[in-house]
Image (cartoon, grey):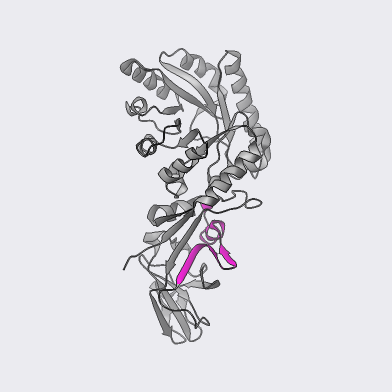
């Protein structure tokens, strides 16, 4: 018997989400963010589909992710956002690294001299995230030094909003103004740059941030970071019932006796737990779908098993499908719902399932 979760990845929905973003942003170029294994959806498969649909720019976090895409046949430019280990793979695989510090720029210049290849780069400006990038206060001074380095060619400029859902637009407005100021400085020097700042939330809410290109991530996978408006989830997480037990009133369920039956109860077991992506924090207050009905998770989620309350569902049998995330009949559990139960964000839910589940691609 196989343990764990099956992930159904709906490729038609993936195409529809791409089309939605293209239509919304007009003629802007699109940088498809496929980091973290395409948010758990499988980067190689997702990127191949996007490339077939005309996407010509991809974004990943680290060089290792970019190499996997190259080895899977992706030929379009790949922007590497965060890597600080500068080595010859950048040249070998024709990658576009992002410069987040003067040190990275100097190392890339040395790599260029060593390999005798000019390296295209994008510049990241920290406009308020406080994470990576050249601080906007010192941007002009640092850029003078970077532009003087031999062997690197600045082809793009980017920044990142500090609120993933852009709930505070006043902060986003300040960040955008800082970015545009830095962009104007570089363009006054005659540089032709691809400017990009719009994340998924900005694609939905802030058309003034579209600039030359947009850089959507989670919206490609059908999850709206603003929790309103367009949604078309690509991923469904499923498992099945492997055991059904009838427990008397007053019987404790799972570790710590955190759930005690208040009636004669029908309890189902599913072959997955926190080792498989079911976050332990949803113990006792999340639910799953069985035959289109809600079945509460009872007791603490275990490493390998999770218990659900099937009381009143006498038609449920061993082997029946259980939906952990997605739609079943008219009922649905969204990534945002699970995130709410767990006190986290939908990004974590997708990537956690994606790290452990077996993927099946539906076309």
Q: Is 348 or 254 nearer to us in this picture?
A: 348
Q: Measured along the vertical axis of the image, is residue 107 above or below residue 23? A: above
Residue that appears at 60% across and 41% down: 21
Q: Is residue 96 on the magenta stretch?
A: no
Q: Residue at x 42, y 53 (%)?
A: 354
Q: Where residue 41 sits in the image (x, y, percent)?
A: 45, 50
Q: Is residue 219 visible?
A: no
**In the image, residue 324 lies in the stretch drawn in magenta:** yes
Q: Where the N terminus falls, by quadrant?
A: bottom left
Residue 223, compared with residue 76, is above or below; it is: below
Picture coordinates of residue 208, whole percent (x, y): 68, 33
Q: Is residue 287 visible?
A: yes
Viewer-nearest residue: 330 or 114: 330
Q: Position of residue 164 (x, y in %)?
A: 57, 43
284 relative position to 188: left or right = left
Q: Residue at x 42, y 59 (%)?
A: 277
**Left or right, 311 with reference to 103:** right
Q: Quadrant of residue 6?
A: bottom left
Numbered range of the magenta stretch: 321-346
In the rendered image, residue 284, in percent from the top left (x then y), is placed at 49, 70
Q: Residue at x 42, y 66 (%)?
A: 239
Q: Is residue 152 positioned above or below 16 on the image?
A: above
Residue 167 location, quadrant? top right
């Amino acid at each position: 018997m196989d343990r764990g979760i099956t992930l159904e990845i709906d490729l038609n929905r993936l195409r529809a989400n791409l089309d939605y973003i293209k239509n919304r942003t007009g003629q802007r170029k699109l940088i498809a963010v496929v980091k973290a294994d395409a948010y758990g959806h499988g980067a190689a498969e997702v990127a191949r589909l996007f490339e077939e649909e005309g996407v010509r720019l991809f974004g990943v976090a680290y060089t290792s992710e970019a190499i996997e895409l190259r080895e899977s046949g992706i030929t379009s430019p790949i922007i590497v956002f965060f890597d600080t280990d500068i080595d010859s793979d950048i040249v070998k695989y024709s990658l576009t690294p992002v410069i987040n510090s003067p040190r990275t720029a100097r190392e890339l210049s040395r790599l260029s001299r060593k390999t005798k290849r000019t390296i295209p780069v994008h510049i990241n400006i920290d406009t308020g995230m406080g994470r990576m990038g050249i601080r906007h206060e010192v941007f002009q001074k640092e850029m003078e030094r970077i532009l003087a380095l031999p062997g690197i060619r600045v082809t793009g400029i980017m920044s990142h909003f500090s609120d993933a859902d852009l709930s505070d637009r006043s902060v986003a407005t300040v960040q955008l103004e800082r970015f545009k100021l830095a962009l104007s400085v570089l363009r006054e020097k005659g540089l032709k740059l691809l400017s990009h700042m719009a994340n998924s939330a900005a694609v939905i809410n802030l058309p003034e941030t579209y600039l030359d290109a947009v850089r959507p991530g989670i919206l490609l996978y059908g999850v709206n970071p603003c929790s309103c408006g367009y949604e078309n989830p690509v991923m469904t997480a499923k498992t099945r019932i492997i055991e059904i037990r009838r427990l008397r009133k007053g019987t404790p369920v799972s570790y710590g006796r955190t759930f005690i039956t208040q009636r004669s109860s029908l309890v189902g077991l599913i072959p997955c737990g926190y080792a498989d992506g079911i976050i332990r924090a949803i113990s006792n207050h999340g639910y799953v779908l069985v035959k289109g009905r809600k079945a509460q998770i009872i007791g603490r989620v275990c490493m390998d098993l999770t218990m659900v309350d099937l009381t009143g569902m006498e038609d449920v049998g061993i082997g029946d499908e259980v939906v952990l995330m997605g739609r079943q009949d008219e009922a649905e559990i969204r990534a945002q719902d699970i995130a709410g139960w767990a006190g986290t964000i939908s990004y974590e839910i997708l990537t956690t399932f994606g790290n452990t589940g077996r993927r099946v691609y539906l076309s």
